[in-house]
Amino acid sequence: MTSQLPLAAAPGVADAQRTPLAASDQRRRAGSRRVDLAYYVFLVPALAAFTLFVVAPAVVGIFYSFTDYAGFGTWSFLGLSNYQALLADPEVRGSYAFTLGFAVVTVVLAQVVALALAIALTSRIRFATGLRTIFVLPLVLSGIVVAYVFSYLFSNTLPAAAAAVGFAPLEQSILGNPDLAWLSIVVVSAWQTIPGAMLVYTAGLSAVPADVYEASSIDGASTWRQFRSITLPLIAGFVLINTVLGVKGYLGAYDVIVGLTNGGPGTETRSVAMTIFSGFTGGDFAYQMGNATVFFVVTVLISVVQLLLTRGRAIRL
Amino acid sequence: MTALQAPRTTAAADPVDAPGPSRPSRLHRPSWSLTLLLALASLTVLAPLYVTVSMAFKTSEQSVDGNAFALPAPFNPASFAQAWQVTDFPVALAVSVLVAAITVALTLLLSSAAAYAISRNWSKRAFRWSLYYLLAALFIPFPVTALPQIQLTAALGLDGPVGVGILHAMFQLSFATLLYTAYLRSVPIELEEGARIDGASTVQVFTKIVLPILAPMNATVGIFAFLASWNDFMLPSLITSDPAQQTLPVVQNIFQSQFGTDYNVAFASYAMAMLPTVVVYLVAQRWVISGITQGAVKS
């Protein structure tokens, strides 16, 4: 320790005092030496690429949101007027309302179904492996292709079936119905994301010891009571992880919507992502970068709130 | 993986448990009613896939009769040949393979190397903060950076498959580095120390010792990156300027504008677009499932 450089000494000692022996050994040795240049060679490419392709574009984009840049040519500063205009823009507000509403409905639907499937698949059933194979399938399929298939079913098969049983409200394609089109997006998004959530729940459920259930059933607990008092508290962390990941995914929804309604009818089902992308062809570059910045803040806030809720509750495997 | 093997282990242990207590509880008998219920529920997955395949084998005339669930009569495999031509399938497939290969290779290479440097210098602030810096991307959805990224890739001449692969890798980077770092920090350092005493350099330690240790993580990260890249529509549709260099999911949009009622051709094309990942999934199911589970649980 005496040979250590003065600067490296302090954190090294502090680390050594509060870590287990083996780890502190390794830390002290690492801390006492100058860092091998090779480590920088390993680290820098990732940092450089990430900075160039993600961070720099984000910073440049946020910068342009304070200008009147059209995506080409000259520009001048506007201050906050893009943001003021955004807040008053009914199309932008509509896209946020749709996206948030769609995300909430879909995450609830997907989590309930995923948890039910996970519980059923980890119960004592026949053909558990084969059934799981089927239920996971949507996960490996491309969202846009799935959406095209469902688009056909919604606009041809469903109306035909509705006509056959004489159910008038569904005899027209729901994709063209301003009140119902969003439902098709909920269904397909859930269809596609349920398997991932289901697998996480399966992992969570398998960590719950079986004897807890046996003990409670000897005590006469009903299945519902077991679910409420044992299963749910023990997998609460997984519920929150799934919800955070799910909401983040649904907020950025694009592929499925393009494949089903392309934002229509009108702009009823236009997500925030679709509105932002319109800035590239519509000449509203700076304006939509303001929208993107707002969207960034909104998603971070939602994620942070959810993560604060997960804090300390997540069960690690 | 441990998580996924767990249910099987408990199930396997049951026959041993069951004879123990005096009466076999109802928990120990496989439930046929629940199995039946699940089988019915699985139709929600199978039905759209059945429609895709059956429509693909229909004739144009039959494909517009509105009865999606009817079996193809007559059986018409010619739709596939048409779809193959219309979408220029071999080209789109090659582009998709190229994009996915770049994504997986870049993700594995950049993140495993960075994670190694970070985990072995965790006491150094610069390395620790590098991880936090990379993790910031977990909070940056693509729409936020999309417009400037489109400009950047165009300016660099990367407005094609290579640029798409690079950007796909960038969005995997934070997640992959996090997984690798967590994994490496749990791996004992003794092996590496031994090699160092024998005179191995940091680079040699990484390639000879660390990379083999990382093999299971490579599978997880690789599958995750492959599926995300292969199935994506948003990024290639925005970044790639030349329609002839589009990926398999993107070229499917041709059926939205042309070939209006040739549903059989469209569905044959959808089926061909779905087939590669379905085959990969069925062949490497264990890896896919454990990869997805680990990836999601550890995030």
Image (cartoon, coloured by chain):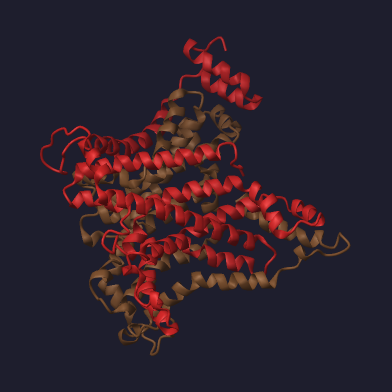
Chain colours: A red, B brown
Task: Please identify the quadrant where the N terminus of chain A is shown.
Answer: top right
In the figure, B191 relative to B51: above or below?
above
Task: Point out residue A245 in the picture as x, y percentages from the top left corner.
Answer: 47, 48
Is residue B84 something one can see in this rendering? Answer: yes
Q: Is residue A216 left or right of residue A300?
A: right
In the figure, A118 relative to A296: above or below?
below
Q: Is residue B9 left or right of residue A68?
A: right
Q: Residue at x 45, y 61 (%)?
A: A192
In the figure, A94 relative to B189: above or below?
below
In the foreground, A210 or B151: A210
Residue furthest bottom as drawn: B74
Q: Is residue B234 left or right of residue A217?
A: left
Q: Residue at x 65, y 47 (%)?
A: A233
Task: Please identify the quadrant where the C terminus of chain A is shown.
Answer: top right
Is residue B239 something one can see in this rendering? Answer: no
Task: Point out residue A229 in the picture as x, y percentages from the top left corner.
Answer: 69, 50
Q: Is residue A82 left or right of residue B145?
A: left
Quarter residue A35 falls in: top left
Residue furthest right as drawn: B22
Task: Point out residue B255 in the picture as x, y percentages from the top left corner.
Answer: 27, 71
